[in-house]
Image (cartoon, rainbow, N blue to C red):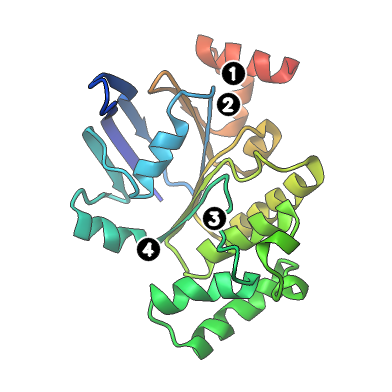
Amino acid sequence: MNLAIHGLVQRFTDPRSATQTTVLDGLDLVTGTIQALVLIGPSGGGKSTLLRILAGLDVPTAGTVAFDGAPLPRDEEGLIGYRRTVGTVFQAYNLFPHLTAMQNLLLPLVHVHGLSEAEADDRVREPLDRFGLAAHAHKRPAELSGGQKQRVAILRALVVRPQRLFLDEPTSALDPEMTGEVLDMIGELKAAGTQFVLVTHEMGFARRVADEIAFIADGECPALAPPGEFFAVCREPRVVSFLERVHSA
């Protein structure tokens, strides 16, 4: 994928006070031809807002975004069509608590993508087994560990066969063992050719999985580079300060 962002602005207005908050402030970001883009940076810098725009969930105040030369739609009908071509995974698993893991996977395939129940069932069986979830298919979310719930959430986004995945801090609420489960799954997805944009605070994983790393801070992207260059030679002051804080934590 090639991603080209120019002059991206996102402002939110408080309906009670009418005050505006600028979250993205003229952000520019142009990648090479890559498979995995990882977004890192301080909290409140604009990473999640940017990811929501890329996933077609929010419309920016100003600026342009294009994947592989095709601009993201801005009208609701176009956005609905675009959302059907991508998968999104957020910190909260957003699984339906009254449905089993299997039912959570089948629901979007049948009711959003129009597959028959038999077709949907055939599609999810193999990935359930491949990612170690077949034995848990009958369990509801309350019966699953955090790592299992997040793997189901990723699998739900994956079985619709999206053009690319967008993942926002998918391990932030997990303990180290469960974090490892989820990161291993994402690593397998990359090895299988899946395109994705990922927000993470796991610097070691960012180094391992990214083709390019974008540093997002103060609503801007002051640094974009392949992992080796980013961590070894990037001298942008905000990047240096951020990495020093991360490594000393």
* Marked residue nearer the N-terminal end (2 or 3): 3
In the image, residue 228 sits, relative to residue 88, either above or below, namely above
Q: CA distance from mark 4 to mark 1?
A: 37 Å
In the image, residue 98 sits, relative to residue 229, either above or below, namely below
Q: Amino acid at mark 3?
A: Asn
Mark 1 Cα shell of 10 Å, populated few (<14), some (14-19), many (≥20):
few
Residue 134 on image: x %, y %: 73, 75
The residue under label 2 is 229
Residue 190 on image: x %, y %: 60, 55
Tell whether label 3 touches label 4 (CB within 8 Å): no
* Marked residue nearer the N-terminal end (4 or 3): 4
The residue under label 1 is 233
Residue lying furthest right:
177
Mark 2 Cα shell of 10 Å, populated few (<14), some (14-19), many (≥20):
few
The residue under label 3 is 94
The residue under label 4 is 85
Q: Amino acid at mark 1?
A: Val
Q: Amino acid at mark 4?
A: Thr
Which residue appears at 72% of the width and 53% of the height? 147
Q: CA distance from mark 1 to mark 3?
A: 39 Å
Residue 31 on image: x %, y %: 40, 38
Which quadrant of the rendered structure holds the C terminus?
top right
Q: CA distance from mark 4 to mark 2?
A: 32 Å
Tell whether label 1 touches label 2 (CB within 8 Å): yes
Asked whether the viewer can see residue 31, the reply is: no
Q: CA distance from mark 2 to mark 3?
A: 36 Å
Q: Amino acid at mark 2?
A: Glu
Residue lying furthest left:
75
Which residue appears at 53% of the width and 76% of the height? 106
* Marked residue nearer the N-terminal end (4 or 2): 4
Q: Secondary structure at mark 1?
A: helix
Mark 4 Cα shell of 10 Å, populated few (<14), some (14-19), many (≥20):
some
